[in-house]
Image (cartoon, rainbow, N blue to C red):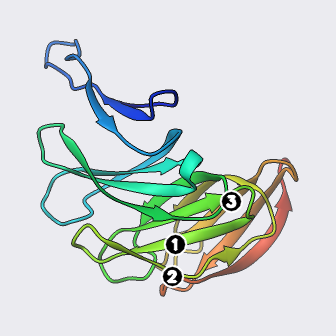
Amino acid sequence: MISGNLGPHTLSVLLCQGNGTLREPLTVPVGRFPHYRAFGDWNGDGHLDLAVVAAGDDAVDVLLGDGTGQLRKVTSYPVGTNPHGLEAGDVNGDGHLDLIVSNRSSRDLHVLFGDGTGAFVAAPPIPVGQDIIALAAADLDEDSRLDLVLVSATSHVVILLRGDGQGRFAPFALQKAGE
């Protein structure tokens, strides 16, 4: 289990002992106000890695795992203002996991393209015109390309974006939540 600790700006990693109890937490320093997380194997070593939103830094921190529960922060990527959502998926079809970040105050998305070594390359921001508080990635139209579902905090709308398989997105339609 991984918990973000907003005050000390750390993560607590609690590993299972195999008997229903947890070990003492491992503390991992990260950026300010860590909360939303995404998991994947960023560098292809077969170990689970982590990305975490550092909302106080308007950034995403990337941490590499070693398979024992230890995580090492390797870098931080600037994103938009007040990041809230974070999702991992291969949005450009190159076989490497990418990161998609929603930013409430700058009202945009940032896509970070993974290169398979643990590094990411930022694409230009995608304006969405809404304060997105959460997002999910899935193939909504069964075309083998990841699409996005975005949730606006104040407009109470769900925005569906169709992925083109190259890392770009265009609106499906705008629907009010509950309709």
Residue 150 image label:
3
- Position of the N terminus by quadrant: top left
- Decide: is 114 above or below 30: below
Identify the residue at horizontal 81%, vertical 69% (top origin): 129
176 or 129, nearer to the observer: 129
Q: Are marks 1 and 2 in contact (CB under 8 Å)?
A: yes
Mark before the other along the chain sequence, 1 or 2: 1
Q: How far from the left and from the top, in percent, is residue 80?
A: 63, 64
Q: Quadrant of residue 74?
A: bottom left
Residue picked out by circle 1: 111
Identify the residue at horizontal 21%, vertical 66% (top origin): 43
In the rendered view, does 58 fall on the left or right side of 13?
right
Q: How far from the left and from the top, in percent, is residue 170?
A: 68, 82
In the rendered view, does 81 fall on the left or right side of 3?
right
Residue picked out by circle 2: 167
Mark before the other along the chain sequence, 3 or 1: 1
Q: How far from the left and from the top, in percent, is residue 116?
A: 24, 73
The CA span between labels 1 and 2 is 8 Å
150 or 122, nearer to the observer: 122
Badge nearest the viewer, 1 or 2: 1
Element at badge 1? strand
The CA span between labels 3 and 1 is 14 Å
Q: How far from the left and from the top, in percent, is residue 111?
A: 52, 72
